Structures are given as structure tokens and as C-alpha cells.
Amino acid sequence: MNYANGEAVKVGDIVGLDQDKPGVVVCSISDGVYTQSHPEAAWAYLKHGFIVDFPKYGLIHFDQAKADLKLIARAKASD
């Protein structure tokens, strides 16, 4: 799954949508990557896409990245 600019969506990425405070990608269903707080058992039924947790909107499922969804910061590499 890619952002509109072609960069790959990664769990932990910080993204912006409209004027809301930045959100965090909490799982990538398409890539099979989930966090402990957003496990596969809860979201795999959606089949594809990714989920972002925004302070204002809450959890939003994107089946594809929208043009107004902007990558602000890349996920930090895990040790």
C-alpha cells in the first residue's frame, strides 16, 4: 500500500489529514503488519488497506491513500 506520492505506508508513520493534528498508522492490513493495540484479529476482516488513529477523528480505515493524506514523518526504525 502506498501514499499518493508513491511512498510505502508503514505502521508507525505520522500522517496529516486536513487541519487535524497528525495521526499514526496503527496497522497495515495489506502488508499484514499490526500493533499490539490494533491486532490482526480485530482488523483482518477488512482484507486490505491501512488504519490511522487521529486525535480528532479516531480510527479511520483507508482502502487506498487519499491525495489529502500527507506523510509527515516516517516510522522510527525498531531496534
Image: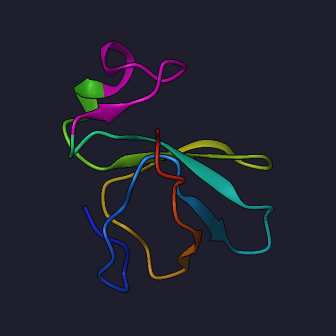
Relative vertical location of residue 7 with respect to residue 34 in this rendering, above or below: below
Query: Which residue of the protein is positioned furthest toward the front in this rendering?
Result: 79
The structure residue drawn at horizontal position 55% and vertical position 20%, both measured from the top left corner, is 37
Compared across the picture, whether 60 is left or right of 28 comes to right
The structure residue drawn at horizontal position 78% and vertical position 46%, both measured from the top left corner, is 55
Q: Which residues are magenta?
A: 32-43
The structure residue drawn at horizontal position 71% and vertical position 48%, both measured from the top left corner, is 57
Compared across the picture, whether 71 is left or right of 43 comes to right
Position of residue 42 measured from the top left corner of the image (x, y, whole percent): 38, 17
Task: Name the image quarter holding residue 19.
Answer: bottom right
Relative vertical location of residue 7 with respect to residue 59 in this rendering, above or below: below
Position of residue 36 measured from the top left corner of the image (x, y, whole percent): 48, 18
Relative vertical location of residue 59 with respect to residue 6 in this rendering, above or below: above
Residue 33 belongs to the span the image colors magenta: yes
The structure residue drawn at horizontal position 47% and vertical position 51%, both measured from the top left corner, is 77
Query: Which residue of the protein is positioned furthest toward the bottom in this rendering?
Result: 5
Relative vertical location of residue 43 with respect to residue 58 in this rendering, above or below: above
Residue 25 belongs to the span the image colors magenta: no
Viewer-side residue, 18 vs 11:
11
Q: How is the image coloured?
A: rainbow
Quadrant where the N terminus is found in the figure: bottom left
Compared across the picture, whether 26 is left or right of 64 comes to right
Task: Name the image quarter holding residue 45.
Answer: top left
Viewer-side residue, 55 vs 35:
35
Position of residue 20 measured from the top left corner of the image (x, y, whole percent): 79, 64
Number of residue marks: 0
Query: Which residue of the protein is positioned furthest toward the top in this rendering?
Result: 41
